[in-house]
């Protein structure tokens, strides 16, 4: 029997797994891939972003509620999930920015955090890992730290001299960065909304104009994973994070049927590969499948 393919998606907070790469995760699960989400922090310092949930009793129990939300999203996506066990750094606001809270994820020694992730990599032995780019996808200190820890762990996990106490070496074969918020995608969705006469198109036009070109990373996309049939699971998982996502908010303004036609993929940048592959790709396991299927059993003497 062919070896089961394994994907590890490293995220900063509960809800990030549902807003970045969720439909492709659900697709890979449906195809029999073992998908493990690693959530670096508990999201304890996240604001309540859904006005319907902005109540004192919710704020008082936010850590517990976010764990329950994560459980629900995990079930919907069919993934497995592990906590890395660090505390949310919060998004600093103000001028000047306040210092980060003591003991938070972004301030934890990089080696300490890397060792924990290396331990999970060696335990679960993913063939492919995904994380954020060097800017974190957006400038939250936990997202940037998630990038740093993921890259360091990808490099260290296969090296027997690094963290020898953290399990037998295992080298993942590919590392990807999420590239969800390209301008190309928003323009495509906007144009489809205009063509369909959907009123929320005006709001998209405003956002596209405000963003300018600075945020556009379209040129970095190497890999478009078709996942149109799984977008509804992404939306259900997002709604499960009820403190973080307003069910009437902009996430859900583009009808699914329209998204399936206008933009039925999720995008990634191949950051590191130890297997041969050809860009552009449509599969995170391109080159990995071939390597595994053709690998000879090592000769035993
Ligand atoms: Zn986050």
Image (spheres, rainbow, N blue to C red):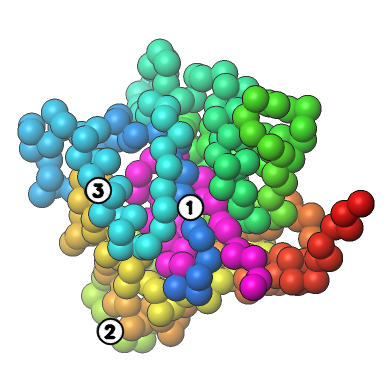
Q: Is residue 283 left or right of residue 184?
A: right
Q: Residue at x 25, y 41 (%)?
A: 66
Quarter of the picture holding the N terminus: bottom right
Q: Is residue 71 among what the camera can see?
A: yes
Upstream in sequence: badge 1 or badge 2: 1
**Residue 13 in magenta stretch:** yes
**Residue 181 in magenta stretch:** no
Q: Which mark is residue 69?
A: 3
Q: Is residue 287 among what the camera can see?
A: no
Q: Residue at x 42, y 53 (%)?
A: 80
* Count of labels in the image: 3
238 and 100: which one is in front?
238
Task: Identify the magenta region.
Answer: 1-29
Secondary structure of residue under mark 1: strand
Residue, disc 1: 36
Please tell me whether residue 262 is drawn above or below residue 208 in the rendered image: below
Q: Nearer the viewer, mark 1 or mark 2?
A: 1
Where is residue 261 shown, x and y percent of the image?
43, 84
- Label 2 crowding class (10 Å Cα cut-off): few <14, some 14-19, many 20+? few
């Amino acid at each position: 029997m062919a070896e089961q393919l394994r994907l590890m998606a490293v995220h900063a907070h509960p809800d990030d797994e549902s807003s970045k790469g969720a439909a492709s995760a659900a697709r890979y699960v449906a195809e029999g891939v073992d998908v493990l989400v690693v959530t670096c922090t508990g999201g304890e310092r996240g604001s309540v972003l859904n006005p319907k949930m902005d109540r004192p009793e919710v704020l008082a129990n936010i850590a517990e509620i976010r764990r329950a939300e994560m459980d629900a999203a995990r079930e919907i996506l069919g993934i497995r999930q592990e906590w890395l066990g660090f505390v949310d750094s919060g998004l600093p606001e103000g001028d000047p920015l306040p210092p980060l809270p003591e003991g938070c994820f972004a301030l934890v020694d990089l080696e300490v955090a890397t060792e924990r992730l290396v331990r999970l990599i060696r335990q679960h032995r993913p063939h492919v890992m995904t994380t954020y780019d060097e800017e974190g996808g957006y400038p939250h200190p936990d997202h940037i730290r998630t990038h740093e820890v993921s890259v360091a762990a990808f490099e260290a996990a296969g090296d027997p001299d690094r963290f020898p106490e953290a399990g037998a070496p295992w080298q993942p074969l590919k590392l990807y960065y999420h590239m969800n918020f390209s301008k190309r995608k928003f323009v495509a969705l906007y144009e489809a909304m205009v063509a369909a006469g959907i009123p929320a198109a005006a709001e998209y036009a405003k956002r596209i104009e405000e963003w300018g070109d600075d945020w556009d990373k379209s040129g970095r996309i190497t890999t478009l994973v078709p996942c149109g049939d799984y977008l509804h699971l992404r939306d259900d998982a997002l709604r499960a994070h009820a403190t973080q996502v307003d069910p009437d908010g902009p996430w859900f303004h583009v009808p699914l049927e329209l998204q399936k036609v206008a933009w039925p993929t999720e995008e990634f940048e191949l950051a590191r590969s130890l297997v041969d592959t050809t860009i552009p790709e449509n599969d995170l396991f391109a080159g990995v499948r071939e390597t595994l299927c053709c690998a000879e059993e090592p000769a035993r003497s």
